[in-house]
Amino acid sequence: MKHRKIWALMLALVVTLGLSACGTPGGNQPGSANPGVEASGAPSTQPTDTAQAQPTPAGEETVVRLGVLSGPTGIGAAKLLADSDAGVTGNTYAYTIAADNNELMAGLTQGTVDIATVASNVAVNLYHKTGGDVRIIALGTKGVLHILEGSGGTEIQRVEQLRGQTIYAAGQGANPEFILRHLLQSNGLDPDKDVTIVFADASEITQKLMTGEAKVAMLPVPAATAAILKSEGKIRSAIDVTEAWEGLEDSGELMMTAVVARTQFIQEHPQAVAAFLEEYAQSIGYVNTNVEEAAQLVAGFGITPSAAIAKAAIPQCHLTFVSGQDMAGAVSDYFATLYQINPSALGGALPDDGIYYVP
């Protein structure tokens, strides 16, 4: 295996890791989509064949410039990154670990990143923004949000029991807010009358939970995980938002992470894309089944501050892998729900089937 050229930006601020995966493209612009509803005036972004894009000749090495988003997305890719460092991957990777979606969006649109893991709503934004030049090649992580109960409480077991509570939450104007509001409404609660939602950053929320000033909060993994561990039993996960969401009718799976690639790269290097998909799927499988070993890798890459947090966070991340013809069915209802909540999050446009790369 040829020498691998690697650069890694180790950013391990717990309070930003999970929120990055929740998706705030272009500042605080969250995303959504609805395959079941047509957006008026939305131009078609079906990818067109590029005559200039030719597959790489056999025997010629392709360096895959891979961007991995910190947080749950990075957790799933940890084994792939470790194998890349060890020189045992089929592809040659030059990878970067990014703190937020904006960094990866810039790399994809400027052509300095070939494949990246981003929030699924960001993938839709990129597809529209580039006119189909960035497409989804796989889906990775499901929901990572948890509603926490502090002060040693055990009263909250179901969403309906949030009535009358003050809920501290991170992610105002982004997917976390939309998800929380939809979850409340679907369980018979008016988000503006039956509860009080106070938005703050994750570090402030964690501090309020620790001091008892906040009793209920919604945080993403691994920030939620870190708070639980630090509290020594005073804070617990009362509601797994992913499980609660998937119990709703017609809301679909809470599929919050997508793997995207530049269309030109797909056309020129289909074998490299196929190899990546296989290696990424294997990485997720390894992390899910070898939690203790994977936690060491995750901490080693700075994706979480410690192996202890990674070990506790991995089971809460709902790591999965979906590709090919299964993608549309897995994520379309989620996009549909988000579109109904806030269509402007995607500029009023919905992704057509061209967004999904099916070999």
Image: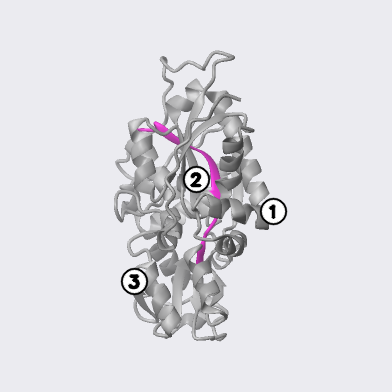
The answer to whether residue 147 is above or below residue 70 is below
First in sequence: mark 3 vs mark 1: 3
Foreground mark, 3 or 1, reads 1
Outermost residue toward the right in this view: 289
Range of residues picked out in magenta = 131-145
| Label number found at residue 199 | 3
Q: CA distance from mark 1 to mark 2?
A: 23 Å
- Percent coordinates x, y for residue 29 in the rendering: 31, 53
Q: Point out the image quarter for the C terminus.
A: top right
Foreground mark, 1 or 2, reads 1
| Label number found at residue 237 | none
Q: Check disc 3 and give the amino acid type.
A: Phe
| Label number found at residue 290 | 1
Q: CA distance from mark 3 to mark 1?
A: 36 Å
Mark 2 residue element = strand
- Residue 110 sits in which quadrant? top left
Mark 3 residue element = strand
Q: Check disc 1 and give the amino acid type.
A: Asn
First in sequence: mark 3 vs mark 2: 3
At 56% from the left and 32% from the top, the residue drawn is 358
Residue 139, magenta (yes or no): yes
- Percent coordinates x, y for residue 159 in the rendering: 52, 76
The answer to whether residue 130 is above or below residue 290 is above
According to the picture, the residue beneath numbered tag 2 turns out to be 258
At 36% from the left and 37% from the top, the residue drawn is 107
At 55% from the left and 24% from the top, the residue drawn is 270
Q: Point out the image quarter for the N terminus.
A: top right
- Residue 164 sits in which quadrant? bottom left
Q: Say if residue 350 shows up in the picture.
A: no
Label 1 crowd bin: few (<14), some (14–19), many (20+), radius 10 Å? few
